[in-house]
Image (cartoon, rainbow, N blue to C red):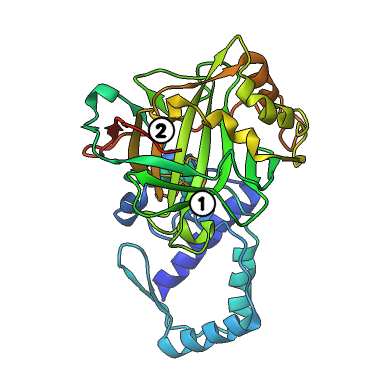
Amino acid sequence: MVDLVKKVEQQQRCETDINEKNVEYPDENLPQNIIAFAADDSTFETQQVCLKMFCGTLAITDQIIRTAHSKLDSCGITSSDNRGKHLNHPKKIDDEMIRSVCDHVKSFQPVESHYTRKNTTEQISRLRASQSPLAISLSRCPQWSSLDTLQFKGYWDNEVNGILLNNGSTAYFTFESEVRPILRGGPLIGEYVFEQMHFHWSVDDFSGCEHLLDGQGYAAECHFVHYNSKYESMEAAVGHPDGLAVVGFLLEAVDAPNPRFDRLVEGFERIKKSEQSVRVTSESLSWMDSDDLQEGNYVTYKGSLTTPPYTECVTWIIYEKPVHIGTEQLGLLRQLEGPDSIPIERNVRPTQRHPPGHSVIYVKQVKSKL
């Protein structure tokens, strides 16, 4: 009983320091990861744990209080710290004491957690096996030429109009109708349904692409996102390793405008503000219709989305030869504004670690049937 009184007094002094002196402890006093925390010599009675671990606002109901009272009253209040040391408190607890503890816990203001701050979605994703984008060395890729040619059906020759939208982070294109273009062949098993097209770019002409081929950067990168037709929707497909197929085109800025981009660029001029949209025809995709893409070589690998939540559900197909876009045409893309009415300067994810044994295939096409 004497030991219990001493512990209570010690805890009260700890609380006084916290409430009156606003004691802060440097992060280096805390375990740096979950494994270190499990092996740490600290207990739940130490000041830094009181400050850093029990700092959230809790919703305590009368039912929780009654349940806690019943269980604590019946078991003699046996608990343990994180070293396995049992703390036996033979004294019974009344409602007022439990409420006092609950009020004390709720009095702590929420602060940024040590672990939450260290492990953002971006950082956690780096622990996964197949993240995208990648910096790819073509000379190190095994070469295949026996795959079926990639077949694009119903893209620029679709009778249905599309919608071009500034969604606050990129220029986004999709078709109005449920009748969508189809992609098949190459490394894909089955058919993939076109869902949307979007762009990534930066403020200069060399860091706007997400994928790097032989260390070469470009002004922008365009992604055509498709989902596997065996799933009901894009949302359902994301939960499967074979759910999505993304075809990427590297865009190289050149002085002369590319006439094939004219229809699309006209749309860029009308969606400068965030959430603005405009109806465009399927001819906005006519820049795809060229011999280079019909017979173009590409790299393919299993990877992830390059935007949160970075799900590893993508078969990537990145064409080797870049598509030319005029500097002025590209400038209209760079003028698109985010929700803060400031031009979107960069929407590119950095290249990710290439895990050992993760295969990227260099495919030499003989003839694509477009």
Percent across and percent down for residue 181 are: 54, 48
Callout 2: 10 Å neighbours few (<14), some, many (20+)?
A: many
Mark drawn on residue 263:
none
Q: Is residue 239 rendered to the left or right of residue 34?
A: right
**Along the line of sight, which residue is nearer the eye, 217 or 258?**
258
Which of the two marks, 2 or 1, is nearer to us in this view?
Answer: 2
Asked whether the viewer can see residue 357, the reply is yes
Residue lying at 68% horizontally and 24% vertically, measured from the top left: 262
Give yes or no for contact between labels 2 and 1 (Cβ–Cβ under 8 Å): no
Percent position of residue 164, x then y: 69, 40
- Name the disc covering residue 52, or none: 1
Residue extending furthest toward the top: 255
Tell me the residue at 43%/62% (across/down). Answer: 230
x and y percentages locating residue 1 in the rendered image = 41, 76
Residue in the picture at 61% in, 24% down: 260
Residue 21 vs residue 33: left or right? Answer: right
Relative to 357, is 131 on the left or the right? right
Question: Callout 1: 10 Å neighbours few (<14), some, many (20+)?
Answer: some
Q: Please state which of residues 139 and 67 is positioned toward the viewer in this rendering.
A: 139
Is 76 or 158 nearer to us in this picture? 158
Earlier-in-chain disc, 2 versus 1: 1
The part of the image, by quadrant, that contains residue 212 is top left
Amino acid type indicated by mark 1: Lys
Q: Position of residue 347 (x, y in %)?
A: 58, 32
**Residue beneath label 2, please?**
318
Q: Does residue 120 appear in this view?
A: no
Image height of 338 relative to 137, above or below: below
Q: Determine whether 251 is above or below 369 in the image.
A: above
Question: What's the CA distance linking mark 2 and mark 1?
Answer: 46 Å
186 on left or right of 24: left
Q: Quadrant of residue 83?
A: bottom left
Secondary element under disc 1, as helix, strand or loop, is helix
